[in-house]
Image: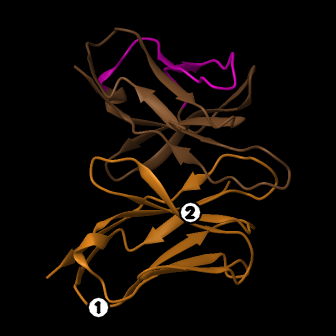
Amino acid sequence: NAGVTQTPKFQVLKTGQSMTLQCAQDMNHEYMSWYRQDPGMGLRLIHYSVGAGITDQGEVPNGYNVSRSTTEDFPLRLLSAAPSQTSVYFCASSRLAESSYNEQFFGPGTRLTVL
Amino acid sequence: ELKVEQNPLFLSMQEGKNYTIYCNYSTTSDRLYWYRQDPGKSLESLFVLLSNGAVKQEGRLMASLDTKARLSTLHITAAVHDLSATYFCAVDNSSGNTPLVFGKGTRLSVIA
């Protein structure tokens, strides 16, 4: 199992450009989420999904879109990049079941710089 | 709204010493998670605590959960340099698969 994979590892954008951060998992996890990590801020939830076709907003959703067409993939789209979106982005996944718990497995991260 | 607070946020400790990191949270929950992050790396799951009184140990790290006090502790015994990392606690509200809420992390530096 590859676990949770993210591409690209590094990206530099100019203000106003758009791009998609890719996330995939091969553990058949229903639950997937995107976080951003900034110095001194911990991890902040951007969007999450509890299954294909279902997404919801987290704490800091503005400027980002997501979709979940398959169980495996959960891409994060930046619509018009801004310097405030310079951050490290982590994708995570976990099982989803009434009796389960929410131990999330994290991808390696994408380091994004917006100039 | 669920809030999670860790303290201290920064910790510099000598090798061989003991110390405790604290994680307080604001609403009822009996599911708490500890993660470790090395510089420039991703988060790695350390402990999953699922009930009041739960205690887990791995090497020099021991985590416990007191749901009545809404408090988890991560105790470090006889610290070694390899434990230098940032430690995060995270909580969900136990009503299903709701998003985890993370503390801001404790950056631990173990010095000789």
Which residue occupies the extreme front position in the image? A1
Q: Indicate which disc residue B17 carries.
A: 1
Instruction: Give the number of the mark in front: 2 or 1.
Output: 1
- Disc 2 or 1, which lies upstream in sequence? 2
In the picture, measured across the screen, residue A105 lies left or right of residue B32, that is left
Residue B72 marker: none
Residue B8, position as x, y percentages in the image: 38, 74
Instruction: Give yes or no for residue A80 being in the magenta stretch.
Output: yes
**Point 68% across, 52% down: residue:** A102
The overriding secondary structure of the stretch rendered in magenta is loop
Q: What color does chain B have in the rendering? A: orange
Callout 2: chain: B
Vertical side of A67 occupied by B87: above or below: below
Picture residue at 80% right of the left edge, 50% below the top: B96
The chain ID associated with circle 1 is: B
Instruction: Give the residue type at disc 2.
Output: Val
Mark 2 secondary-structure assignment: strand
Q: Give the alpha-carbon distance from disc 2 to disc 1, as whole Å.
A: 26 Å
Residue A69, horizontal then vertical, whole percent? 69, 15
**Where residue B4 is drawn, which disc sits there?**
2
Indicate yes or no whether the magenta region holds residue A94: no
Query: In what quadrant of the picture does the N terminus of chain B appear?
Result: bottom right
State which region is magenta. A61-83
Q: Is residue B92 left or right of residue B23?
A: right
